[in-house]
């Protein structure tokens, strides 16, 4: 048996070897064929035709809107660029401009008349113009000529506030003013004739009659279909004077303002009444609370909230006392309050605020279309 198997393998070995060689030769040919079919990538990149770009219709919801084409100026706009058409908002700036007047002061050891320095005026004008108010309420303006000068400088800088009201009281030096791009349709300012008087005591506690120092500015502007009535005041400062107790004088002046506001709201309960100015006291003190009135009253005047870019609320820096305080306010009647846009309103904290004044201005935005 063993011999038969050996002979069988011996005689068939050449056949197996031939089959094995044939299989190797076939695999070699197949491998060569694959190499020939493998593309030359560099050559292909150079000679391959460019694929056509696909044309895709954009999704209108995901495609950003094109830049709008600016609307042409309305035909009613005069050649000087002034546009008296009412906007949807009224921008009101309340500002104590710090002695925009001529006053006597010591200069180089001598008492001389001194104007507000040019550097202060330049900063003041720039701050006001950048705020772009429609109505500007001013404390501490001097003469009517000083007001005309400021109005002219604002106009030259691009802010035309054509209409004005000028008011005052017993103080011959410092006055109140209102400038507006909207017509002033009514005025009823108080105090210039000495009618705003009260009984108090002097520095020695002796009874004495006083007149309200800066009076009450009362002017109504018309913006479109809205009429807003502004009452501007500048109460007695905290500086002690020999004439009387500064705190008592301020309380009496606040009471006179409250009486005037009550008369207006009794006659016209729905009046859009805005009371503003330098009250020279903080919000929980008697003068401010007296002007507000009872919270539940229909004649309540609500102090509007203003903050600067850092969330701070002070409006005045008293250098002598190194004291920051909230002295400036804008208060609104119940009908005006819903028009106040608190998010857009603010205290102007320009880097040069202290050059222009010792006060910071309050910008109040009212939405006229509400």
Image: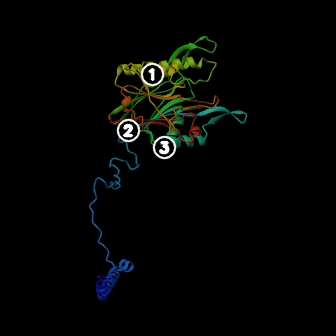
- Residue 347 lies, in percent from the top left, at 49, 36
Total marks placed = 3
Q: Residues within 10 Å of mark 2 (few under 14, many from 20)?
A: some
Is there a contact, CB below 8 Å, between mark 3 and mark 2?
no
Q: Which mark is residue 292?
A: 1
Q: Residue furthest front?
A: 1
Residue drawn at x 33%, y 47% is 76
- Above or below: residue 152 compared with residue 296: below
Q: Is residue 332 visible?
A: yes
Depth check: give the residue in front, 321 or 169: 321
Provide the secondary structure element on which disc 3 rests.
Answer: helix
> Which of the 4 image quadrants contains residue 92?
top left
> Which of the 4 image quadrants contains residue 210?
top right
Residue 337 shown left or right of residue 323 in the figure: left
Depth check: give the residue in front, 181 or 305: 305
- Residue 283 lies, in percent from the top left, at 50, 24
Which of marks 2 and 3 precedes in the sequence? 2
Provide the secondary structure element on which disc 2 rests.
Answer: strand
Give the foreground label among 3 and 1. Answer: 1
Q: Which mark is residue 130?
A: 3
Which of marks 1 and 3 precedes in the sequence? 3
- Residue 41 lies, in percent from the top left, at 38, 77
Q: How far apart in space, not on screen, are marks 3 and 1 (Cα)?
A: 31 Å
Q: How far apart in space, not on screen, are marks 2 and 1 (Cα)?
A: 25 Å
Depth check: give the residue in front, 354 or 15: 15
């Amino acid at each position: 048996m063993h011999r038969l198997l050996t002979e069988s393998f011996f005689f068939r070995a050449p056949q197996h070897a031939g089959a094995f060689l044939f299989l190797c030769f076939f695999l070699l040919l197949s491998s060569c064929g694959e190499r020939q079919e493998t593309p030359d990538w560099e050559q292909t990149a150079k000679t391959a035709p460019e694929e056509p770009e696909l044309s895709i219709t954009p999704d209108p919801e995901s495609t950003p809107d094109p830049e709008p084409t600016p609307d042409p100026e309305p035909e009613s706009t005069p050649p000087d660029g002034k546009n008296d058409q009412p906007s949807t908002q009224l921008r009101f700036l309340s500002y104590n401009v710090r002695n925009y007047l001529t006053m006597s002061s010591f200069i180089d050891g001598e008492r001389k008349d001194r104007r507000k320095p040019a550097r202060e005026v330049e900063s003041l004008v720039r701050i006001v113009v950048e705020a772009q108010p429609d109505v500007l309420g001013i404390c501490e303006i001097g003469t009517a000529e000083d007001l005309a000068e400021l109005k002219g400088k604002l106009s030259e800088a691009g802010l035309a506030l054509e209409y004005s009201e000028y008011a005052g009281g017993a103080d011959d030096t410092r006055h109140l003013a209102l400038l507006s791009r909207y017509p002033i349709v009514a005025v009823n300012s108080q105090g210039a004739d000495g009618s705003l008087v009260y009984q108090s005591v002097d520095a020695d506690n002796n009874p004495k009659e006083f007149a309200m120092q800066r009076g009450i500015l009362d002017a109504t502007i018309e913006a479109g279909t809205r009429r807003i009535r502004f009452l501007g005041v500048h109460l007695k400062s905290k500086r002690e004077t020999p004439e009387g107790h500064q705190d008592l004088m301020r309380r009496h002046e606040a009471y006179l303002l409250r009486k005037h506001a009550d008369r207006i709201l009794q006659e016209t309960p729905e009046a859009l009444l805005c009371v503003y100015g330098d009250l020279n006291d903080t919000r929980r003190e008697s003068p401010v609370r007296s002007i507000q009135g009872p919270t539940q009253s229909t004649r309540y005047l609500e102090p509007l909230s203003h903050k600067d870019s850092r969330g701070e609320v002070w409006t005045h820096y008293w250098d002598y006392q190194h004291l920051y305080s909230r002295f400036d306010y804008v208060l609104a009647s119940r009908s005006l309050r819903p028009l106040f846009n608190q998010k857009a309103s603010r205290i102007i904290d320009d880097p040069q605020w202290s050059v222009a004044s010792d006060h910071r201005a309050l910008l109040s935005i009212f939405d006229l279309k509400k």
